[in-house]
Image (spheres, grey):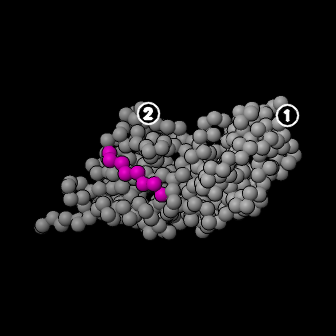
Amino acid sequence: MEKKVNPVRNTVSNRAKAIGLLSGGLDSIVASRLILEQGIEVEALNFVTAFCTCTSKGSGCLASQKAADQLGIPLKVVDISEEILDVVKNPKFGYGSGMNPCLDCRIFVFKKAKEYMRESGAEFIFTGEVLGQRPMSQRREAMNTIERESGLKGYLLRPLCAKLFPPTLAEEKGIVDREKLLSISGRSRKGQISLTKRFNIKDYPCSSGGCLLTDKAFAQRMEDLIKYKQDFRLPDVMLLKYGRHFRMSPAVKLVVARDEEENFKLAALKNNSDIMFHAQDPLGPVSILRGSTGGEFVSEAASITARYALGKDNEGEVKIRYFTSQGDDKFLKTGPCGESAMKGRRI
């Protein structure tokens, strides 16, 4: 009998191909090894956003690149920072403990992965997810919802806990041997760690979260941004990463740098309509006043900037230079803002 060739198989090799979502953590590394061990060709995908904590400018996710190198598989990094903003603004399934729309984010990522699976001729997608490991996105109900909403029912394999779910199409077709998959569940990583010797995995990052939206302080800033500026874009999000933030009015916000490095960061993030402040004498922080189109809150912003220029002494006056992109430098002298007044503004 003539052997039928699956038309979606990779044309370069007779092996089946799979797309692995590779975070670079231990779980995704072990999951990849389980699939590679079955003689399946693997290409890794990593989606990065402005909310990731494991990225380096121009380098994507450092952990995923290191893991891909260790596994000897190609890695495609996709920046979805702009696209994910609408998900963060209006999540269908709500937020977690912070401003993290975990289910909606996973659904969005899996939809993008599904598109790439079809483009690349892969048979299925796999992840390092473990049933019960994360309280929001890795409950059985949540995992089933993500699979259904992303359109990946039957095409999403979770090698570490596969035996706790019905077989996928790849298992039913014999592409993947179900008996070689695992049934790990819960928050403990003892099962995964025990496999590091078998797979000669010597270097992997800790299991801490990597999303700024779960950070309490960042989440408060994000919530404030969504409340007062529904049409925010990526530059507004980038500004949330630096400085001390003060809400001056529904339309106006002040950001004060915390150190010299942040002085440069804020200067780089300044837009044409921002008013920038710089403490000159004594030399101190840079601040950005955003949304003050009519010059509102200039005196108060200068006073808050002065407070951080003076430090703990908190006495005397500070010479403040302030200007817009038009280069119309102005100077004023001001004393520090009172703590009670700042407390009412602080985000």
Determine which of the numbered discs, if any, sits on residue 203 in the image: 2
- Residue 66: x and y, percent? 40, 39
Give above or below for 47 relative to 33: below
Q: Residues within 10 Å of mark 1 (few under 14, many from 20)?
A: few
Quadrant of residue 33 within the rendered picture: top left
Q: Residue at x 71, y 58 (%)?
A: 292
- The residue drawn where x is 49% and y is 48% is 184
Tell me, yes or no, if residue 136 can be seen here.
no
Q: CA distance from mark 2 to mark 1?
A: 53 Å
Query: Where residue 327 sits: x, y (%)?
Result: 62, 49
| Front residue (pair 343, 39) | 343
Between 92 and 26, which is closer to the camera in this rendering? 92
Question: Residue 222's x, y, as percent?
Answer: 66, 55
User: Is 165 or 88 nearer to us in this picture?
Assistant: 88
Q: Is residue 90 visible?
A: yes
Residue in view at x 44 percent, y 45 percent: 58
Q: In the image, is residue 11 part of the stretch drawn in magenta?
A: no
Q: Residues within 10 Å of mark 2 (few under 14, many from 20)?
A: few
Quadrant where the N terminus sits is bottom left
Point out the stretch of residues depicted in magenta: 73-80
In the drawing, what numbered circle is on residue 189?
none
Q: Does 185 sit above or below residue 252?
A: above
Magenta-highlighted stretch: main secondary structure? strand
Secondary element under disc 2, as helix, strand or loop, is: loop
In the picture as drawn, the residue positioned furthest to the top comes out as 313
- The amino acid type, in three-letter code, at marker 1 is Gly
Q: On residue 316, which mark appears? A: 1
Q: Nearer the viewer, mark 2 or mark 1?
A: 1
Q: Amino acid at mark 2?
A: Asp
Left or right, 344 with reference to 209: right
Quarter-wise, where is residue 140 in the image? bottom right
Task: Residue at the far left: name it.
Answer: 1
